Amino acid sequence: MTKAINSKIIATGSYLPSKIISNFDLAKMVDTSDEWITERTGIKNRHIANKDQLTSDLAYEASIRALKNAGIKAENLDMIILASTTPDLTFPACATIIQHKINAINAFAFDVQAVCSGFIYALNIADNFIKTGQIKNALVIGAETMSRIIDWQDRNTCVLFGDGAGALILQASNDSSGIIASKLSSDGRLNKILKTTDGVSLSQKSGFITMEGKEVFKHAVEKMSKSVFDVLKIANLTTSDINFLVPHQANLRILNSVAEKLKLTSDQVIITIENHGNTSAASIALALDFANQNNKFKTQDIIVLEALGAGLTWGSIVLKW
């Protein structure tokens, strides 16, 4: 009998712009304070791309670090998926721009847009391509310049978001490590509670982020928790099997509420929001690299990734490190 193909994360990489805006900086721009932001979000600082830095530039930096850490060349990649809601251009796909920048001449490349859930969606797609035997090496990226779609006069949203990029190399493997199960969901009836004010088809403008905070909070806790229970059931595991949870870094209160429902300790939850802010599709990839570079994970650890984003979209992945 042919042994099943697994898809395994063999390396991670990340990049954060050098410019940092603190809560104290924001307090000079809008009616807010460090105490107000910290209490409601858990955020202290966020990285902001320079005017001449594009999403593809951030993604390039994260990608070459992931490739270096994997010890493979870009020409060995079969596929590149970028999760982003802030691409350089309306078209072509930003992933193709990254493909050119890293010289991945043998890969095919495309974008995934599921906002904050985008990285979970992209990783699920790459996993399926590997498990069906179509590819061996995938570069999966989450990259955002959210600062470009923020209304810096709206204190309810400008305090939340930051820029950055994370990447990983997913590779076909015959050992027991790798992605065990995935669960993706969406509910378009809730598309208006988190959205931009404009769009290409509507006005040829990108618009600014608007959000019904209380509604988003309620649905985030409920749906992210249920998604984890659902994916664990698919994997024939329980919450007691989880070694680490790597959630989308949206809001510390949301993360704490989800952890409480899953009966996880604070040490089991990878949290980077204090100094990253909400980097949308980049947040899980950034948190994964942070944990990996700090040797948080051990071989055979059970790790759950989860996110919720506009749409609403949400999803979870359980993997063995």
Image (cartoon, rainbow, N blue to C red):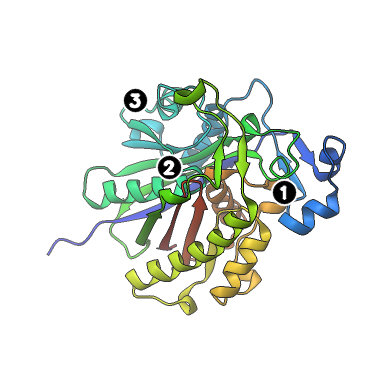
Is residue 299 positioned above or below 173 on the image? below
Given contact means CB atoms under 8 Å apart, are the residues at marks 3 and 2 in contact?
A: no
Q: Secondary structure at mark 3?
A: loop
Residue position marked by numbered label 1 in the rendering: 275
**Amino acid type of disc 1?**
Asn
Residue position marked by numbered label 2 in the rendering: 140
Residue 37 picture location, percent across and down: 78, 51
Q: Is residue 68 visible?
A: yes
- 9 or 228, which lies in front? 228
Q: Is residue 77 visible?
A: no
Point out the tag, 1 or 3, that comes first from the N-terminus. Answer: 3
Q: CA distance from mark 2 to mark 1?
A: 23 Å
**Amino acid type of disc 3?**
Ile
The residue positioned 31% from the left and 62% from the top of the image is 175
Figure label count: 3
Is residue 214 positioned above or below 45 on the image? below
Q: Secondary structure at mark 1?
A: helix
Point out the tag, 3 or 2, that comes first from the N-terminus. Answer: 3
Q: Is residue 113 left or right of residue 198?
A: left
Task: Indicate the quadrant where residue 38 lies.
Answer: bottom right
**Amino acid type of disc 2?**
Val
Which is more foreground, mark 3 or mark 2? Answer: 2
Residue position marked by numbered label 3 in the rendering: 105
Is residue 273 positioned above or below 135 on the image? below
Point out the tag, 2 or 1, that comes first from the N-terminus. Answer: 2
Q: Secondary structure at mark 2?
A: strand
Residue 266 picture location, percent across and down: 65, 70
